[in-house]
Image: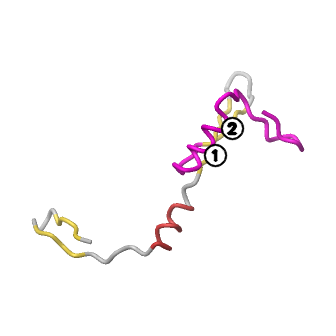
Amino acid sequence: QISWNKVKLKYKIIKSIELNDIIDVLNEYIFIVREYINNKSKKSMTYIDVKSKILHDILRVLLQDVKEVNLMEDKSSM
């Protein structure tokens, strides 16, 4: 691969990234779980930020008509 060096104002040849390195980095960022606590009611809401584009697209299709998902019970409900 070739990269532009802004400081030296010339191109630089860089080592290619191995596929395993990319997979390791992506696995680190599949999703992020956030918890929001309402100051008045003290109720908490959990949000899942899906970072994986593939997972995001799959969930969008599967859950398109779902308004809420409950994962706290023994048997999950939607």
Q: Amino acid at mark 1?
A: Val
Residue 54 picture location, percent across and down: 55, 50
Residue 1 picture location, percent across and down: 27, 72
Residue 6 vs 72, above or below: the answer is: below
Q: Which residue is mark 1?
A: 33
- 47 sits left or right of 69 in the view: left
Residue 66 vs 48, above or below: the answer is: above
Which residue is drawn at the image coordinates 18% and 73% (left, top)? 12
Which residue is drawn at the image coordinates 56% and 43% (left, top)? 57
Residue situated in front as seen by the camera: 40 or 1: 1
Which residue is drawn at the image coordinates 53% and 49% (left, top)? 51
Asked whether the beta carbons under mark 1 and mark 2 sit within 8 Å of each other, the answer is yes
Name the quadrant containing residue 41: top right
- 9 sits left or right of 63 in the view: left
Residue 46's mark? 2
Whether the magenta-drawn stretch holds residue 36 is answered as no
Residue situated in front as seen by the camera: 44 or 27: 27
Give, as a single range, the part of the protein colored magenta.
49-78
